[in-house]
Image: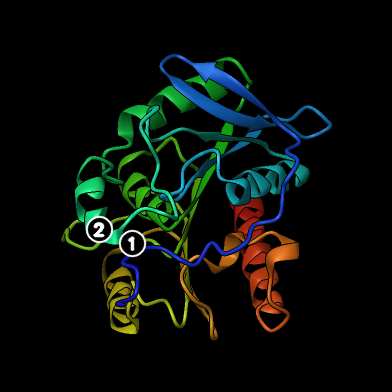
Amino acid sequence: QMADPFLYNTGERSHYGCLGHEVQIEYLKAYVCRPSFSTDKAVIVVHDVFGWRFPDIRYIVDLMAGHGYITICPDFFKGTEPWKPTDHWVDFPDWMKNHDPMKVDKEADVVLKYLKEQCGAKKIGIVGFSWGGMAVHHLMLKNPQLTAGVSLYGIVRDSEERYTLLNPTFFIFGEKDHTISLDQIFLLEDKLKQYCKVPYKIKVYPGQVHGFAQLKPEDMKPEDKPYIEEARRDMIDWIKMFV
């Protein structure tokens, strides 16, 4: 049994009662959670392969809203089936062909328009996990409307143009991520030093595997908890610094 290419063990997940609600934005469904006070700051959360309904990702949306941001997780899969923990990973490359994290520009524009026109957002950040981390890296190279980004264990791999970030971007990695080698992380760091004109940060969290940062508190292992909490704090601090 080889390691899953892109997935982490979803194991037993505890039930999660969401604080937000679902909305329809043009052709997209989205999960939105708002803070208790009005604000003109917003954050887009980009889900991983398990999609916009996955409890862990909704937990992150609620967490960001709790820090004072109108937070939205749109269905970047546009109503198609997300990857399921029970699917066979031999089918994963085919599934990925139809779910390309570099083809999210149109959806991002729809959501940005909604946040600006319907929610009064003036500054908008973005955070994404795994598949969503790749989408964030891509969007931070392409969309100047995004004030700051955090990519958690997801990078654009095969483009020479992937280092000219438009706005501040923070890359979070787990040291034991079998999908992103330390070599790739060092290469990213090296090239960003050369080409990147905006603030950026790269941080590797000891002993952590792919998918570590979106676990809900009751699903964390005690030895991982400090790193998970630190990564989340770092993510929120980066957004607070720029958005």
Label number found at residue 36: none
Residue plotted at (53% across, 79% down): 208
Name the amino acid type tagged 1: Ile
Secondary element at tag 1: loop
Residue at the far right in the pictured view? 36
Secondary element at tag 2: loop
**Left or right: 125 with respect to 50?**
right
In this rendered view, identify the residue nearer to me: 46 or 211.
211
Which numbered disc flags the more N-terminal residue, 1 or 2? 1
Residue behind mark 1: 155
Q: Is residue 78 above or below residue 95?
A: above
* Residue 11 at x, y percent in the picture: 57, 64
Q: Is there any visible trace of residue 157 in the rendered image?
A: yes
Mark 2 crowd level (few <14, some 14–19, many ≥20, 10 Å Cα): many
**Left or right: 205 with respect to 210?**
right
Residue behind mark 2: 162
Q: How is the image coloured?
A: rainbow
* Residue 60 at x, y percent in the picture: 64, 49
**Left or right: 227 with respect to 27?**
right
Q: Is there any visible trace of residue 163 in the rendered image?
A: no
In this rendered view, identify the residue nearer to me: 81 or 119.
81
Q: In the rendered image, which quarter contains the C terminus?
A: top right
Residue plotted at (72% across, 46% down): 16
**Left or right: 18 with respect to 32?**
right
* Residue 33 at x, y percent in the picture: 69, 33
Mark 1 crowd level (few <14, some 14–19, many ≥20, 10 Å Cα): many
Name the amino acid type tagged 2: Arg
Mark 1 vs mark 2: in front? 1
